[in-house]
Image (cartoon, grey):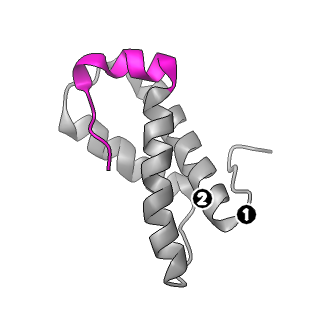
Amino acid sequence: MIEIDYDNLERDLDAGTFRIELEEALKEGFREIHARGDRLPPPSYYASKISEIIHQGGPVPDHMSLPIWDQVLAACENAREDVTGESSHEGTV
């Protein structure tokens, strides 16, 4: 799990460190789930839950909602793909 620094969240989003830290934390959890033989839900499932937790955990200005969603979804997609080897980029048409 990662600690959200709400005072510096915008800076962390801009620098990409938020996504990188979240992705690394997700890989750990996803590996545990995958090792048990359980199938991982789609990245959007995790992204919606994580985004909701972030918004409930502290003050998030409205203009940061989309960047948070984008980075959380990217972290979920990348972590899932790294663990399972399956491409899961749901936004790809």
Residue at figure coordinates x 20%, y 38% from the top left: 57
Please state which amino acid type lies under the numbered disc 2.
Answer: Arg
Does the magenta segment cover residue 7? yes
| Residue 22 horizontal/vertical position (percent) | 43, 43
Dominant secondary structure of the residues highlighted in magenta in the image:
helix
Q: Nearer the viewer, residue 7 or 35?
A: 35
Compare marks 2 and 1 and give the one earlier in the sequence. 2
Give the crowd class for mark 1: few <14, some 14-19, many >=20 residues within 10 Å.
Answer: few
Per the image, label 2 sits on a secondary structure element best described as helix
Name the residue carrying label 2. Answer: 80
Q: Extreme bottom residue here?
A: 37
Residue 4's place in the image compared with 76, above or below, is: above
Residue range in magenta is: 1-16
Name the residue carrying label 1. Answer: 86
Q: Please give left or right for residue 50 compared with residue 45 in the image.
A: left
| Residue 67 horizontal/vertical position (percent) | 48, 25
Per the image, label 1 sits on a secondary structure element best described as loop
Residue at figure coordinates x 32%, y 43% from the top left: 2
Residue 1's place in the image compared with 19, above or below, is: below
Give me the C-alpha separation between circle 2 and circle 1: 7 Å
Tell me whether circle 2 and circle 1 mark residues in contact (CB < 8 Å).
Answer: yes
Q: Please give left or right for residue 49 compared with residue 78 in the image.
A: left
